[in-house]
């Protein structure tokens, strides 16, 4: 009965699928994984509701979020493998997979800014660093900071995107 002032959906840049250039909000959605597909379908449902019911909906497509207290993801797994050599990290595409990483504080700042700014209708923003890093580059950083080597196993096979990154200039 009450119309909300704004709805914010947290989505993912995985909706774009494979891309060798930074994806923009206007690009076609071609997800390669089930995760990306579910996120893109959810976005379509929200877009439909915005149009049918005149709702103000903003979608934030987040890059790979990392930071303290996160208990999954490549960065967490690599750090964990330093202290637990029984837990190797398997890197697909021999560690050459490229990702756009976003620190949790930056993700939170984007959400807060979205809450504070009034926007009518349906809007989409990429929330990302607009940079891409290989898993091997992330390993080098972790080794340099910790002075220890993560326990990794390289795997040629990959059923995931080799490169995902997004242009954040609209945000």
Image (cartoon, rainbow, N blue to C red):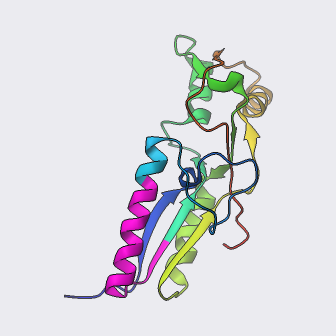
| Residue 23 rendering spot, x and y as whole percentages | 68, 58
On the rendered image, what quadrant is the N terminus found in?
bottom left
Label the magenta part by its dominant secondary structure: helix
Using the image, determine if residue 18 lies above or below residue 156: below
Of all residues, the one furthest to the left in this rendering is 1
Q: Which residue lies furthest to the top in this view?
A: 86
- Position of residue 122 measured from the top left corner of the image (x, y, whole percent): 48, 80
Residue 40, x across and y down, in percent: 46, 57
Q: Is the residue 75 above or below the residue 102 in the image?
A: above
Q: Which residue is drawn at 69% across and 73% down?
A: 170
| Residue 45 lies in the magenta-colored region | yes
Look at the picture and state if 59 lies above or below 134: below
Reply above or below: 36 against 42.
Answer: above
Report which quarter residue 42 is drawn in: bottom left
Number of numbered discs visible in the structure rendering: 0
- Residue pictured at 78% horizontal, 33% vertical: 137
The location of residue 63, given as percent across then percent down, is 61, 53
Q: Nearer the viewer, residue 76 or 26?
A: 26
Q: Nearer the viewer, residue 51 or 77?
A: 51
| Position of the C terminus by quadrant | bottom right
Residue at 50% over, 43% down: 69
Q: Residue at x 57, y 34 (%)?
A: 160
Is residue 106 one of those drawn in magenta? no
Q: In which quarter of the image is residue 114?
A: bottom right
Q: Quarter of the image holding residue 89?
A: top right
Q: In this view, does 96 lie to the left or right of 39?
A: right
Q: Please provide the residue range marked out in magenta.
A: 39-58
């Amino acid at each position: 009965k009450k119309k909300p002032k704004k709805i914010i959906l947290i989505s993912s840049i995985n909706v774009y699928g494979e891309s060798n250039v930074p994806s923009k909000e206007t690009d076609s959605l071609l997800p390669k994984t089930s995760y990306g597909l579910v996120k893109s379908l959810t976005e379509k449902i929200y877009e439909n509701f915005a149009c049918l019911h005149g709702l103000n909906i903003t979608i934030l497509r987040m890059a790979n979020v990392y930071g303290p207290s996160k208990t999954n993801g490549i960065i967490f797994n690599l750090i964990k493998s330093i202290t637990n050599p029984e837990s190797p990290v398997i890197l697909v595409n021999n560690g050459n997979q490229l990702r756009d990483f976003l620190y949790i504080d930056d993700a939170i700042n984007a959400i807060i800014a979205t809450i504070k700014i009034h926007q009518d209708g349906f809007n989409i923003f990429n929330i990302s660093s607009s940079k891409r890093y290989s898993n091997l580059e992330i390993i080098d950083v972790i080794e340099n900071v910790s002075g220890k080597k993560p326990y990794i196993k390289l795997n040629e096979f990959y059923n995931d995107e080799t490169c995902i990154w997004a242009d954040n200039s609209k945000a």
